[in-house]
Amino acid sequence: MFHKQARDVQQTKTDFRYTASQIVEEYLTDVEKANDKYLTEDGNSKVLEVSGTVAKISEDFNKQKVILLKTDTDKAGVSCTFTSETNSKTSTIQVGDRITIKGVIRSGASYDEDLEMYENVILEKSDIVTHT
C-alpha cells in the first residue's frame, strides 16, 4: 500500500458533470446521500467535472492555485485546489470567467453553526477542462 502509485485524476474517466451550484445544493440538502453518490466504498472520490463562474483566485500555503466557483446567489461554492503540474494552466483565468474544472472531492459543502457560515465543497487534484 505504501508504494501504490498516486491516482492520475486527469487521465481517469469523468463520473459526473455538474454546475457548482448543483453540487453545493446536493450537499446542503442531504450530505449522506451526496457522499454515497460521490464517494466510493473505499472512501475515494469519484471524478467530477464542475462548471461555474470564477468568484475568487488565491494560493494555498503550498503555493497551489485555488479557484472558487460561486455565484452571488449560492450559499457556498466549490473551492478547487490545483497541483504543481496544473498550476500553470490557471494563469489566464480571471474572476468572472466561466470554466469547467476536473477533480475529486475532499469534502462537501456544509453549514458551520459555530461560525454561522457555509463551508465550500473542496475539490482537489484539479485541472482546467474548458475556459470560456
Image (cartoon, helix red, strand yellow):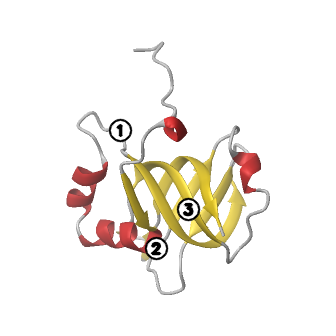
Quarter of the image where the C terminus is located: bottom right
The numbered disc on residue 76 is 2
User: Which badge, 3 or 2, is on the more N-terminal residue?
Assistant: 2
The numbered disc on residue 44 is 1
In percent of width and height, residue 126 lies at: 57, 48
Q: In the displayed structure, would residue 9 be above or below residue 71?
A: above
User: Which badge, 1 or 3, is on the more N-terminal residue?
Assistant: 1
**Left or right: 35, with 84 as reference point:** left
**Residue at disc 2, secondary structure:** loop
State the image quarter where residue 27 is shown.
Answer: bottom left
**Residue at disc 3, secondary structure:** strand
Q: Determine contact: label 3, label 2, CB under 8 Å.
A: no
Closest to the camera, between mark 1 and mark 3, is 3
**Left or right: 87, with 5 as reference point:** right
Q: CA distance from mark 3 to mark 2?
A: 17 Å
Q: Disc 3 marks which amino acid?
A: Thr
Q: In the displayed structure, would residue 7 be above or below residue 24?
A: above
Q: CA distance from mark 1 to mark 2?
A: 23 Å
The residue positioned 71% from the left and 61% from the top of the image is 58
Q: Which residue is mark 3?
A: 100
Q: Is residue 99 visible?
A: yes
Q: Is residue 113 visible?
A: no
Out of 128 and 42, give the one closest to the viewer: 128
The residue positioned 43% from the left and 52% from the top of the image is 48
**Left or right: 84, with 109 as reference point:** right
The residue positioned 45% from the left and 37% from the top of the image is 12
**Residue at disc 1, secondary structure:** loop
Q: Disc 1 marks which amino acid?
A: Asn
